[in-house]
Image (cartoon, rainbow, N blue to C red):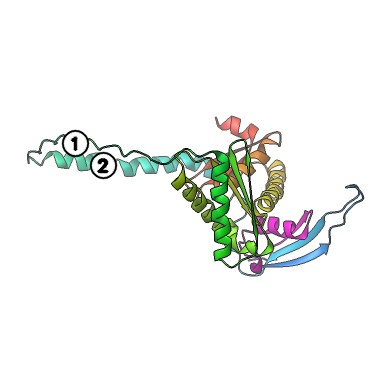
Amino acid sequence: MSHVEIEVRAKTVDLAVEAAMLELGVESREDVSVKVLSEPVKGFLGIGGEDAVVLVSKAKTPSRRGSGRRRNQKQRAGKGGAKGDNTERSSSGPSRNRAAKGNRTPQKQNKPQRKEKKVSDDRPQLSTEDQAKIAREFLEGLVEAYGLEGDVLTSVDDDVIIANVEGEQTEALVGVRGSVRSAIHELTRTVIQRYTQDANRLRLDIAGYAERRRQALAIYAGQLIGQLRSEGGEIMLEPMSAADRKVIHDIAAENEGIGSYSEGEAPRRYVVLTLESSSTEEE
């Protein structure tokens, strides 16, 4: 397989590398070779600055996961065939039912089911501010339990709990592609739900990962949209979390003539970018 190198331009070297890793389908920075072509230059009062430019290549054999995959007309037509296959497989059900009819054993009458008693919920209805306090105390305990130095800041925005875990050492709580952060997010929500009947939405970020990820995805989507405009067809992205898919959909919506939709089942659900004209023809 030929050696693949891509050049990416972004505000910082780290952001450019992260966008390149998305394009190459690489999860760890140790698996890429990075050559900095130019460092970023800050402009005066935000004017005249220059982005960082990096040249990134895989340090190991490229995996099949990762960068956008182009789907041609034959593959799109194959969707109907795939559905047909599922229908054929599901048709085996009635044959089993017909065989079951031959069984003359009388069936027992269903006994009336007992109504389950509803268990009263003695949890109070806490305010969003009180829920934010519970989230902060839990996250502070988690950071301390890991032996890390970091601060936990919480606030409330339109009934949404916003929690930020800050500090260089807290990067250890992010994980590959934010996997550990996602787990901590669910744990925090569970803890809040133990103390209140109706828990508010929670938005958690650790070590600024969410914002970096959003910017990297924006760069990545922009490159794929440029490829889509020049070559046409459709481009399938790698499976992503719901939050990452939303970023891609938002970027597509900001670009005239570009459409997007999701396919697949979680956790393998992915986004497909398409030209709106071609999607109209398919309908």
Horizontal relation, residue 197 to residue 99: left or right? right
- Image quarter where the N terminus lies is bottom right
Residue at the (64%, 32%) spot, across then down: 277
In the image, 95 versus 31, the foreground residue is: 31
Closer to the camera: disc 2 or disc 1?
1
Q: Position of residue 206 (x, y in %)?
A: 63, 55
Write the start and end of the magenta stretch as one range. Answer: 4-31
Residue at the (59%, 68%) spot, across then down: 147
Cα–Cα span, label 2 and label 1: 28 Å
In the image, 173 versus 149, the foreground residue is: 149
**Numbered badge on residue 93:** 2
Residue at the (26%, 37%) spot, across then down: 117
The quadrant in which residue 88 appears is top left
Instruction: Decide which of tag 2 and tag 1 comes sooner along the chain.
Output: 2
Horizontal relation, residue 270 to residue 247: left or right? left
**Numbered badge on residue 113:** 1
Residue at the (82%, 63%) spot, across then down: 37
